[in-house]
Image (cartoon, helix red, strand yellow):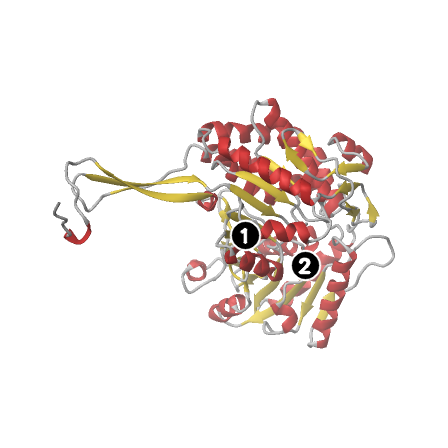
Amino acid sequence: MSQSILKALGLGERNSGTYLGNGEWSQTTSAGVLEPKNPSTNEVIARVWASSPADYDTLMSRAQAAFATWRTTPAPRRGEAIRLCGDALRKHKDALGSLVALEMGKIKPEGDGEVQEMIDIADFAVGQSRMLYGLSMHSERPGHRMYEQWHPIGLVGVISAFNFPVAVWAWNAFLAAVCGDITIWKPSPKVPLSAVASMRICNEALKAGGFPDIFFLFNDAGTELAQKFVDDHRIPLVSFTGSTAVGRHVGERVARRMGRSLLELGGNNAIILDASADLKLAIPAIVFGAVGTAGQRCTSTRRLLVHESIHDDVVATLVAAYQQVEKRIGDPTLATTLMGPLNDPGAVQRFTTAVEKAKAAGGKVRTGGKALTDRPGNFVLPTIVTGLTNEAEVVQTETFAPILYVMPFKTLDEAVTMQNGVPQGLSSAIFTRDLQAAERYLSAAGSDCGIANVNIGTSGAEIGGAFGGEKETGGGRESGSDAWKIYMRRQTNTINYSDALPLAQGIKFEF
């Protein structure tokens, strides 16, 4: 199956990992090789040649030259380029979705869904290309007009994570493109094939439409080029998606050179179930949020706060639901699979370590808690743990795995305090039929997360909303609303159409 997927996307057993621009893929084979593995078997899928320092310098110089032209291209024309990318992705959705499932390990519907996110953000960006609005303001000076406008920022560096191999790039690159920017992409070394395939699809569509290169790609076999990328003064904005630890390092390095960073980091997301919650809505949301992508989403549900009056019944219902999921763990490319593997053996080790820490802290494993050693690949059982407090170290830590900590509460204020009482602040949700509780939750005294939902889970996000979070989640925003502004520079303009020149503070110079 893997060979047919690769062939459908123009990939082979060995592939260049560097797009240099001018229609040229690097022929470098001396900078190392990436060997992405199928998480279901830990077998190498194909190989990707890494980029050399010379490759990096070439693509950076070509990206700069591309920006000089692209920034003056009318924004609606830039939108047309992204429309073509979206159409090309529609044609390749099935194959690219399958590759995402094969290389990352998420199930096929989630792989297809990720490609659909690329298509959706393309559609959004096309509309945004005609809405790069600035404000008109009244001047305090007579005979003057004042307004603001937005200009392209330049080169945008995107460093993406393994769990969303293609969508995060598109969220950034498509909006940056309509804003007049050029994007350089460094994907996770775990999923380079999905990046190469996406780059080929979009660049071929751009070429066929008569557009210049606006997307560039490199892959680093180590960390040297990635570090150079972060420190590069030619890149005014670096968008990083990944762990809080690495994101802190990236943010500090970029700030040191007075650049901008867009950080999308960890989440430790909670769902609150009050006594009035509609469990027919809540239970599927909890299960999907906790086990979807095998718990490897930044928006995965990791904590469940349940009113004490329904706590035991909810736990029993969830245990039964999890045991149904257990029967459908396997190859993510099969239609019958509900949960695929973790991405690599290290993730399995972190899963088992977290379970042992939970037990040592007094937690009780109600279901799951084990790695599946009876088969190849990185499979684990989705896990529910009770008996811990919100303050427990393992609860405070984001583990990228399908572990759900269930804890009771007495009052809504207590639940909100528990939800907010973690270092991360990405996604949150409450299930309630109490209008006052919902509004309290959404108020300034409620959830402190960048995303706060009512009667819908934590996992996933709509393209039209600005995606991101607070605290150690990094504070960045991508996708909808006014997130496009991060890819541009603001300029205030004052025009004097009078015959006088009033100076500040009424100062007068006599000449």
Above or below residue 255? Residue 34 is: above
Residue 200: x and y in percent read 67, 32
Residue 380: x and y in percent read 77, 58
Residue at image position (69%, 68%) is 385
Badge 1 vs badge 2, beta-carbon distance below 8 Å: no
Residue at image position (20%, 35%) is 497
Q: As shown in the figure, which amino acid type bears the numbered disc 2?
A: Phe
Query: Where does the N terminus fall, quadrant-wise?
Result: top right
Residue at image position (54%, 46%) is 235
Q: How many marks?
A: 2
| Secondary structure at numbered mark 2 | loop
Read off the residue under disc 2.
Answer: 400
36 and 97: which is toward the camera = 36
Q: Along the horizontal axis of the image, is 457 left or right of 380? A: left
Residue at image position (79%, 34%) is 12
Read off the residue under disc 1.
Answer: 456
